Image (cartoon, grey):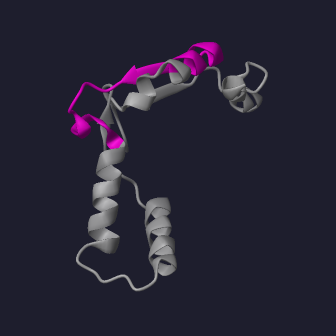
Amino acid sequence: MRTRWFSPKRQPFRRYGYPKILLLWDGAGWHRGSVAQQAVAVLGIEAVHFPPYSPQLNPQEHVWKQGRATVTHNRFIPKIEPVTKELVDYLNTTVFPYTLLHFRSN
């Protein structure tokens, strides 16, 4: 069965004491598909869909834009491994300011 992966018995986030999951989704078709919607319902996840054509509302878009500008912009990349490590290090050590649902990052 294709949809077995979202069985209610398989809720690893519950083990860590998270009372509720809030999932922020853009308008990609696979986020609105019946299998994804069924999984969200079965697992008790609350999904918030960003309005169409509004990447500025998605904080992740700003993270990637800033990461690319800092790590890979205007640069020849002969081997991907060192740049991958540099990007991961940058993402792990940078605090990205954003506002989402009236909350602000520090």
Residue 24 x, y percent position in the rendering? 42, 30
Residue 69 x, y percent position in the rendering? 26, 67
Residue 49 x, y percent position in the rendering? 36, 23
Residue 59 x, y percent position in the rendering? 33, 42
Quarter where residue 16 is shown:
top right
Tell me the quadrant of the picture where the C terminus can be found.
top left
Left or right: 19, with 7 as reference point: left
Residue 66 on the magenta span: no
Name which residue lies at 40% across and 54% down. Answer: 95
Name which residue lies at 70% across and 29% down. Answer: 5
Quarter where residue 10 is shown:
top right
Which of the pair 100/25 is nearer the observer? Answer: 25
Q: Magenta region: which residues? A: 37-59
Of all residues shown, which one is farthest toward the front?
1
Left or right: 81, with 66 as reference point: right
* Placement of 56 over or under 39, stated as above or below: below
Residue 45 on the magenta span: yes
Which of the pair 60/31 is nearer the observer? Answer: 31
Whether residue 45 appears in this view of the structure is no
* Placement of 99 over or under 7, stated as above or below: below
* Placement of 60 over or under 41, stated as above or below: below
Quarter where residue 18 is shown:
top right
Name which residue lies at 45% across and 60% down. Answer: 91
Tell me the quadrant of the picture where the N terminus can be found.
top right
Total numbered badges shown on the rendered structure: 0
Whether residue 99 appears in this view of the structure is yes
